Image (cartoon, helix red, strand yellow):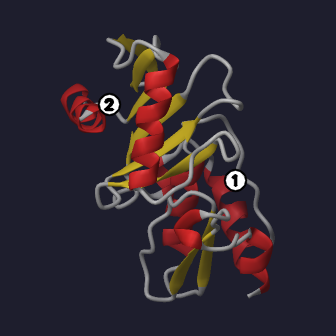
Amino acid sequence: MWIDDLCQSLKWLDANEIFLNGPQKTFYIKDGIYHELKSYFTCKKKMTEVIQIFSFEQNIRLDPLHPFAGGTFKNNAYRWQAVIEPACFDGPFFCLRRHRFDNLKTNDFEISEDLLGNLKKDLIKGDHLIICGPCGSGKTSFLCALLKELCKHMRVAIIEDYEELPVFFPLWCKMKTKVEGIEHGKEISFKILINE
């Protein structure tokens, strides 16, 4: 199966991410450098079908009305994200990343000690934090490392559209939004989860 091939490629290449950007562009990133790979698909239609089937097998809706999907795969060993038409015009996009959350610490990131110290103080005070950056820049990984370091003994509610962050400690809980129609249920939005 194509997804198993991608997982094996990540291990074999010792890479963290593989991207399929349309049927003709497949590449991986290693040490910050992009390397091209042989394409897995020959046409947009087949690639879209295969990604939709994979998403459905993960109990996640992916169709033209909900063209974004993502989650974890193989017991949280991998994270995946997919985008299809009408949101992607050049063909479907699929990204597979290896999880490294178990081993990450805040000092694994290129951030000054002063800034890291200020972030920690602000979070402990209860201030809000926005982490932004391009796809694959380490936003989720940094947030996970920060939470693990600062919130071991605190209540943490993780609310996600796509399941990515693992629950490491007993006081942490995870909630996930859901679009209408999945498992014959009604929509569960961020607003509903926050209000609960």
Residue 28 in picture, x, y percent from top left: 39, 23
Q: Residue at x 30, y 37 (%)?
A: 3
101 left or right, relative to 185: left
Residue 136 in picture, x, y percent from top left: 54, 36
Residue 161 in picture, x, y percent from top left: 63, 60
Picture layout, residue 82 above or below residue 59: above
Q: Nearer the viewer, residue 13 or 182?
A: 182
Q: Residue at x 45, y 74 (%)?
A: 167
Quarter of the image for residue 135 reads top right
Which numbered dot is residue 15?
A: 2
- Marks 1 & 2, CB-CB < 8 Å contact: no
Residue 177 seen anywhere in this rendered image of the structure: yes
Residue 21 seen anywhere in this rendered image of the structure: no
Q: Secondary structure at mark 2?
A: loop
Foreground tag (1 vs 2) = 2
Precedes in sequence: disc 1 or disc 2:
2
Mark 2: few/some/many CA within 10 Å (<14, 14-19, 20+): some
Q: Secondary structure at mark 1?
A: helix
The residue that mark 1 highlights is 115
Which numbered dot is residue 132?
A: none
Q: Nearer the viewer, residue 18 or 45?
A: 45
